[in-house]
Image (spheres, rainbow, N blue to C red):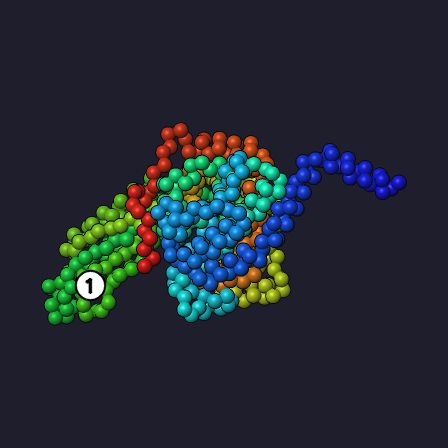
Amino acid sequence: MRRTKNKIFKQTTCVIGLITCLQIEADSSLNLSINKHQKNFEDAAMQIWDWAEVGYQEYKSADLLKQELMANGFSIQSGVAEIPTAFIAEYSNGGPVIGILGEYDALPGLMQTASPFKEIKEGSIAGHACGHHLFGAASAWAAVAIKEWLVRTKTKGTIRFYGTPAEEGGSGKVYMVRKGLFDDVDAVLHWHPSSSNGANAESSNSNKSAKFKFSGISAHAAGSPHKGRSALDGVEAMNMMVNMMREHIPQESRIHYVITKGGLAPNVIPDVAEVYYYVRNPRREKVKEIFNWVVKAAEGAAMGTETTMQYEVMHGNYSKLPNHTLQKIMHKNLVMRGGVKYSKEEKEYAEEIYKTMISPGNKIGDQENISPYRSSHTYGSTDVGDVSWVVPQAGLRTATWVPGTAGHSWQGVAAGGTSIGLKGTKLAAQVLADTAQDLFKDPTIINSAKTEYQERVGGNFEYYPLLGDRDPPLDYRN
C-alpha cells in the first residue's frame, strides 16, 4: 500500500509539474551526449593546443574540427568568406537557426609547456594563451550534443557551428558577417576561456588596427649619415607624437603598438621600418576619430624625417552588444551547472602556478563560484562584437585557468594544457547546449531577444565594418 501511495504521489507530481519532469528528462539525455563525446573533444582540444597555429594558418586545427563534426552528421562548407580556414558546419531539420561560434587560433611568441613554471616549448612559435583550442572544441562539442537531442526528440531546429579563424587581430568573423553568413541566424551563442565563471551582459571596446610602414634611404651610419634618411626615425617620431596624444583622448581609450621592423644593423641607417598599432574605445565612432589622429601623426612624422609612409588597416571590431534576454537564460544555466572543482593534484598544480602571478586578485577556490548576473564592460576587443550587431547573442566565461591568471599569459597556455582547462571546457559545452535547448524548446525567447536587439541597434542602423572593404589579411602573422 505504501508503495502504491508513493507511486501515485510521483505520478501526481509529474502531472502537476509536467514541464519540470520533461526538463529533467531532456537534460538527462543532453548529459548523455555530452559525456559520450567527452574523450573525442578533449583529445581534439589537446591536439589543437599542441599544434598552436596562428591566425589564418590554422589548417590542421580547422580540419580536425570539421572531421569531428562531419563524423557526427553535419554538412560542411569550407573556405567561406574567402578564408581557407573558415568554415560552417550545419545540421538542420527546419525550425529556428541557432549558431555557435568556435575559435582556434593561437598567439605568437607564447610558447609554453603545461608546466606550472615558465619554460619554452621547443619547436613551437606560438601558444594558446587565450585558450582558443578549448573554445573551438567545446563549441563543436555542444553543437554535436544539441544535434543528437534534436534528432532524439524530433524537435525542429537548425544548429550551425561557425569555425571562425584569426580572432586575435585578424577579425575573421568580420569577413563572415560582411559576407552575410549570419543573415538567416536567429541567435548566436559563444563562450571564452577565463580564470572565473560568469555569464554577464558584457560590452567591449571597439578596435581598429593598422601597420604603418616608413621608407627612407639607407647609408653608412658613421661614414655618410647625411646621405641617409632613417625610416626608424619616422617610426620613433610617430610613436612620440602618439604618446603625447594620450593626454587628450577619452580616458577609457587604449592605444598600443609594437615596432615590427626597425633595421638589422646599428651601422646601417634603416631604409624600411614598421610599427603596428591598435586603437580602442567603447564607441566605434570615437575609434575612427582617434585612429584618424594617429594617421595624422604618422604623416607628420614622415614629413619631419623626410621619409615616406603608407599604412594598411589590418582589422577592425565593433563593440559587443549585450542582449539581456538571451544572457539571463545562459546565466541561469551556468548557475544550474555550477563551477569547477579541483582534485588534490589539480589544487597542488594551481598553487604552484599561482605563486608566479603578479596581483592575481582572485584566489584558488574562486573557480567553484559563479559571478552574480550584472552588466559589465571589458576593455579588450573581439570580433564577436560585429556578430552581435547583426544577430542577438549571448556568451559566458568558464574557469579554464587558475584563478587570477591574466589572459595572453604563459600561465594561461600552461593551465590550458591540463585537466584544469578541460574541466572548464566541459562546463562551457554543457551550458552552451543547455541554452540552445532552451531556445529550441521555447521560440518566444528568440522573439523577445530579437525585439531587444532591434531596440538596441535602432531603426536606422546599417552595418559597415570598421576594416572597410579590404580582403582578409591571410598573411598578417607572417
Q: Image quadrant of residue 465? A: top left
Place of residue 474 in the rendered image (x, y in percent of width and height, measured from the top left): 33, 53
User: Extreme right residue here?
Assistant: 1
**Residue occupying image coordinates x 82% and y 41%:** 6
Position of 400 compared to 269: left or right?
right
What kind of residue is marked 1? Pro
**Residue occupying image coordinates x 50% and y 46%:** 74
Place of residue 441 in the rendered image (x, y in percent of width and height, measured from the top left): 59, 36
Which type of secondary structure does the marked residue at label 1 adopt? loop
Q: How many marks?
A: 1
Place of residue 295 in the rendered image (x, y in percent of width and height, measured from the top left): 25, 48
Which quadrant does the N terminus fall into?
A: top right
Residue topped by disc 1: 270
**Residue occupying image coordinates x 70% and y 35%:** 18
Closest to the observer, 227 or 413: 413
Q: Is residue 153 above or below residue 247?
A: above
Position of 299 compared to 94: left or right?
left
